[in-house]
Image (cartoon, rainbow, N blue to C red):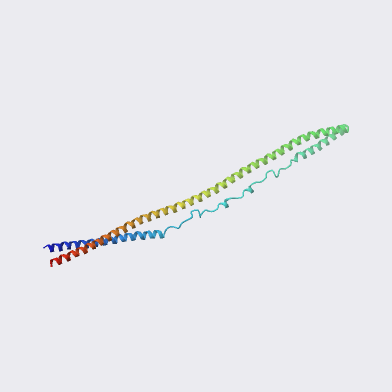
């Protein structure tokens, strides 16, 4: 009876060992597949990593936006005219005054000395008038030239300001685009690194589970061998 009991116990142990071995083998295979899947996904990500970029390689020169503004300037004082109208009027008036004076003297029978004095007086009077007109004309010309010069300076300064504004805005825009490309690249790199780290953890965990299952399977086979030995021992004892 004792032999039968021993054999029955050993048989149960054998059954448990077989079941444990089968279960551990299945778990080892599942864990192996999980590890292989994680490794395959990691290989795919690493093989398809984005190319390293230079985010500033699309920036272009803005030199073509710069224009030569020298042609917008001129010298408004270059063509100042000399006021000759007053001098011409002075000469005409002097001639008329002399003619009238001579006519008067001839008509009245006055002497040559009186005629000369009158002519000189008329000439001096006309000289004063013409000098005043000529001075006013020259002043007006200078004021017009000065006003044009000031206007040119203002227009030139505004043209320079607008040109600089456009160039600086283009540089700012290109810089912002380059920074955006750099941010996009770095974000994708960080995402890939995070995914690789996650998959590496999964692979390590699955590999550890596979090893543990393999060890359990080996232990089950060891138990099976032990139980088989027990059965044989019990059988021999019964004999």
**In the picture shown, does residue 68 fall above or below 142?**
below
- Which residue is at 73% across, 37% downward? 135
Q: Quadrant of residue 236?
A: bottom left
Q: Nearer the viewer, residue 20 or 110?
A: 20
Q: Quadrant of residue 106?
A: top right
**In the picture shown, does residue 164 fall above or below 7?**
above
> Please, which residue is most extreme toward the front here?
237
- Which residue is at 53% across, 49% downward? 171
Question: Residue 41 placed where, x, y %?
Answer: 36, 59
> Please, which residue is most extreme toward the bottom here?
239
Position of 117 with respect to 75 (left or right) is right
Count of numbered marks: 0
- Which residue is at 80% across, 37% downward? 94
Q: Quadrant of the C terminus?
A: bottom left
Q: Nearer the viewer, residue 212 or 239?
A: 239
- Which residue is at 17% across, 65% downward? 233
Question: Residue 42 placed where, x, y %?
Answer: 37, 59
Question: Residue 27 placed where, x, y %?
Answer: 27, 60
Q: Nearer the viewer, residue 193 or 126?
A: 193
């Amino acid at each position: 009876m004792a032999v039968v009991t021993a054999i029955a116990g050993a048989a149960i142990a054998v059954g448990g060992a077989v079941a444990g071995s089968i279960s551990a083998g299945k778990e080892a295979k599942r864990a192996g597949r999980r590890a292989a899947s994680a490794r395959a996904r990691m290989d795919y990500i690493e093989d398809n990593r984005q190319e390293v970029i230079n985010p500033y390689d699309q920036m272009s020169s803005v030199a073509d936006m710069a224009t030569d503004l020298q042609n917008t300037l001129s010298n408004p004082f270059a063509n100042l005219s000399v006021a000759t109208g007053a001098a011409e009027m002075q000469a005409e008036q002097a001639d008329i005054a002399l003619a009238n004076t001579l006519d008067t003297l001839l008509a009245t029978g006055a002497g040559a000395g009186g005629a000369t004095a009158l002519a000189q007086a008329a000439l001096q009077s006309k000289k004063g008038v013409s000098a005043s007109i000529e001075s006013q004309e020259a002043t007006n010309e200078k004021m017009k030239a000065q006003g044009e010069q000031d206007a040119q300076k203002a227009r030139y300064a505004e043209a320079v300001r607008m040109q600089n504004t456009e160039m600086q805005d283009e540089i700012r825009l290109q810089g912002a685009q380059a920074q955006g490309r750099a941010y996009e690249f770095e974000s994708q790199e960080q995402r890939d690194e995070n995914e690789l780290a996650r998959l590496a953890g999964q692979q390590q965990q699955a590999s550890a589970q596979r090893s543990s299952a393999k060890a359990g399977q080996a232990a089950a086979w060891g138990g099976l061998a032990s139980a088989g030995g027990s059965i044989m021992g019990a059988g021999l004892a019964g004999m």
